[in-house]
Structure formats: C-alpha cells, structure tokens
Amino acid sequence: MTERAVLAVSFGTSHRDTLEKNIAAIEAELAAAFPERTVRRAFTSGMILRKLAGEGTHIDNVPQALERLLAEGCTDVVVQPTHVMNGEEYHKLLAQAEPYRARFARMSFGRPLLTAAEDYAALGRALMEALPAQRADTAVLYMGHGSEHQANSAYALMEYAFHDLGRKDVVIGTVEGYPGFGEALRRLKERPQVRRVELRPLMTVAGDHAKNDLAGDEEDSWRRRLEAETVCVLTGLGEHPAVRALFVEHARQAEQLQAEAC
Ligand code: CO
C-alpha cells in the first residue's frame, strides 16, 4: 500500500554503521509515527550516491524516489529532510522535487532541523539530555558542518540557544564554515580554567567528518589540536531519541498544513 508516503531525504553517508544508527533510525521513527504511510529513503549527495553505487548499493536520489512512488500509485507524499539547516542541500531537494508537485494530489515539505526560532531551543533541550553536568573545568565543543550558504548563521544561533538554556559551557565550530576551529578555540580560551573538552559532532550522522576531522589520529584533527584533555563522543544527531522526535514533529506539521490547505 503506497498511496500515501513519507520520503525521508538525507544528505547521505557511505559509513554503514552511522547510516544505520542515524538515518535508518530516523526513518524507523517516521514509520512508527505514520503507520498509514510507507516510508522511503533518498539521498541528496551525488558524491555519496556514486560511492555507494560503486560498492553495489543503490539508493534513490530525490527524482528517482518520487518517480518510483508515482509508478506505485502514490498520490500523497510528505517530504521530510534530515538535513540540519536550510542550506544548499535542502534547497537542492526543493528544486528537485518542484517539477513533481503537480503530479501528486498532495505533496508537502517538512522543515530541516533548524529553521524556526523555536527549533533552536528544541534542539538545545534535546541534546542537553545527553550532556554531562556542567563543570567549571570542562567545555563541550560541537563540530557542525558549516557552509558558504547564508544558512550558515544557524551555528552561531544554535550556540546562543545553548547559552540561553543555561549551557554556557557549549561552543560550536564548523569544519567548512564560520566559526571554524580557530574561532571555537578562542572561545574556549575565554575560560582559562577549562582542562577538559568533550567533542561531539553536530551533524545528522557521525561519518567522515566526525571520525576523521573531529576525532581522527591525524595531527590536524580537532582532538589532536586541542591542548586540553579530550573525550570524543561520536554520536550523530539521529542517535538521540529526542532529536528523532523533532524530525517526526516537523513531518507531522507538514502533513497537517497540507490537510488544512485542502
Ligand atoms: Co563535508
């Protein structure tokens, strides 16, 4: 029965362990929340799709997944991204899905994790459940992906939200945007009493960036560049039940908006 569907769209990862623990876990949560809908997977990263294809695993891109649903008689689809921000990949997803809008009776889009102001507080609260108690000699450093897209401002706002929720020990840097490691390090040094830094990815999956750029053995990993004692907690955002619940909530809101519009 594929008349109604949820299409879960992720950037993707070629690391199978984190794919299962994060992307598949979010999809499973969506399937449990929408028993009347079939849940399908698509990835937006061409690089990841090609890498997986080379390893013998086919995963649909967005147009392929939508074509497949149409061919199976689907008329009503909720597209839920697992992307963190409204950046390049999310806009690519919207552009790829747009030509299909008229071919479904109903098509709606859930928000990425960080869109509305309330999303930042919600993610902060969700992640705080897993954080250790605050200590004067400890800091938590999250690694976001970062981007040249204007949505990159999400990281500074997320750090602000943590502080506003009382977690002033949280610093956020990114691998590919601003603030980078250097800015995050200066931020950490504002608290000279910090002797220990807990490193965590702020990404849907704990893939290449988490394993190598954050926690890797190479000299230029964040772990190696910090002078303080470090502990790496390599859980993707999708491993947090409270974060999975946020994705479900976004899909639910999209479904309801769509129903009201009819
Ligand atoms: Co990257």
Image (tube, helix red, strand yellow):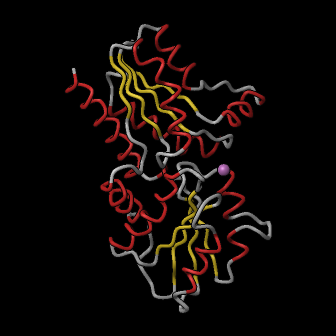
Residue 176, picture quadrant: bottom right
Residue 245 percent location from the top left of the image: 35, 46
Question: Would residue 224 be found to the left or right of residue 19 on screen?
Answer: right
Q: Which of the image's four quarters has the C terminus?
A: top left
- Residue 165 location (% of width, % of height): 32, 71
Q: Residue at x 59, y 81 (%)?
A: 186
Seen in the picture, residue 210 relative to 89 is either above or below; the reply is below
User: Which residue: 51% across, 52% down?
Assistant: 150
As displayed, is residue 155 above or below residue 204? Answer: below
Q: Total number of numbered labels?
A: 0
Residue 144 picture location, percent across and down: 56, 59
**Residue located at (46% from left, 37% from top):** 81
Answer with left or right where residue 76 lies relative to residue 22.
left
Q: Position of residue 228 (x, y in %)?
A: 64, 83
**Relative to residue 53, is residue 251 depicted above or below?**
below
Seen from the viewer's position, the closer of residues 141 and 239 is 141
- The vertical placement of 100 against 26, above or below, is above
Residue in the image at 40% along x and 38% along y: 29
